[in-house]
Image (cartoon, coloured by chain):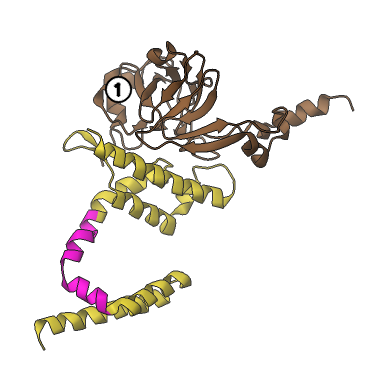
Amino acid sequence: MKEIQGDQAERQLPAGAVLSKEALLQRLKGDIDLIVSPILEGSQVGDGSVDISLGTRFIRSRRSKMTKIDFPKLNKDSIRDFQESVVVPFGDEYILHPRSFVLGCTFEFIALPLDICGFVLSRSSYGRAGLLIATATFVHPGWRGCLTLELENLGEIPISLKPLSTVGQLVLLNASKLPEQPAAKLIPVGPTFTALNEDPRWKKIAALSPK
Amino acid sequence: MSSSGAVDTALTAGLQRVAADAAQLKYAEEAEVVQKTIQTNLTDLLAKIRNRKFISRYSFRASMYHDSVPTVLKRLKAGVAPIEFYDEKSDVMRPASVRAILNAGWELYKTDLTSFYANFKAGEELERLDNLNQLLFKAVEASEVKRQWK
């Protein structure tokens, strides 16, 4: 396959400039350049952004004997004490109750090149119904995988979440080019459990506490 | 000798060669499976091969392999779920076929896992292999959705 690079003029845009629809379409055709896949409808790609939809996998919290989430003390077993994986088949729904929280993921597999970064934004129509889809919204250049979405119902009425429904958009901007592809711990294809227990900062915080 | 008899003889010899080659393979367990499968099902295999419906419906010819697998494999090596690819002739993104995805997965597993591992920080090999399976699963699922989307 011929490698298609984006328009040179677009590439010379200053860091932070939002990419036009033409530039996005051009770069989506590249071999391994910008990837948001699959694009099910042409209308998904707009000026500066690509619509993203909900995947089939969720991680939901459940009531447990755990009295608090103490991040440094979490491990794989204890995380699974209060969170569990759920798969919702296509055509089915996940009911998100008021003040409830669930981790979802994008159906699209995303790979950003080294000179593009992104922001995940909620679709305003869902936002007006009380649905918040993301809290950690920045996507680094070179990132690969399905994005984890932190879905929260801030409204008063349960919300039906259907796989493949368009819940948000990924806004794409030019960035200063990274020198090389950053190595990943793993390449996620579903929502991922918190890994805050692996934060090296906990040890330094603990070292400051009085003995 | 009748023509079908000649074909049978040629096929038998061919399958016996495959079984013998399998016995020489590095992967002893898999070779054993191939050998035993051929030995146990020789008569059936011959009948199915003679009845060319089997071949036309299920074979993944070399030309099809060379047309579709390298593109998919390239994406997989880069740690990308190979869901679709750009078809220059028709200027559209086409979903990868399930056969191309699975064959690319096997080719990567058998010949070039090192390239795939280069995408990761140091970690456990089993986790990375599991990640490869997940990427393949994602590709199969999403390419099928793309095919069925109307």
Q: Residue at x 40, y 28 (%)?
A: A54
Residue drawn at x 42%, y 42% as measured from the top left: B78
Q: Secondary structure at mark 1?
A: strand
Above or below, B12 against B134 in this view is below
Quarter of the view holding residue B33: bottom left
Chain ID, yellow in image: B
- Residue A11 in view, yes or no: yes
A164 vs B36, nearest the viewer: A164
Q: Position of residue B129 (x, y in %)?
A: 50, 51
Q: Residue at image x 26%, y 42%?
A: A1
Residue A39, image x, y percentages = 30, 30
Instruction: List x then y, in percent, for residue B116.
Output: 46, 48
Front one among B26 and A123: A123
Outermost residue, left side? B2
Vertical order, B54 against A140 (above or below): below
> Going 52% across and 14% down the picture, which residue do you hit?
A154
Q: Which chain is brown?
A: A
Viewer-closest of B90 and A196: A196
Rendered image quadrant of residue B38:
bottom left
**Badge 1 density bin: few <14, some 14–19, many ≥20, Cα 10 Å:** many
Query: Looking at the image, which is closer to me, B43 or B87?
Result: B43
Magenta segment: B43-64
The reply to whether the magenta stretch includes residue B52 is yes
Q: Is residue B47 left or right of residue A58?
A: left
Which quadrant is the N terminus of chain B positioned in? bottom left
Tell me the kind of residue under disc 1.
Val
**Residue B104 part of the magenta-drawn span:** no
Q: Residue tagged by mark 1?
A: A45
Please give left or right for residue A179 compared with residue B121 in the image: left
Furthest residue toward right: A211
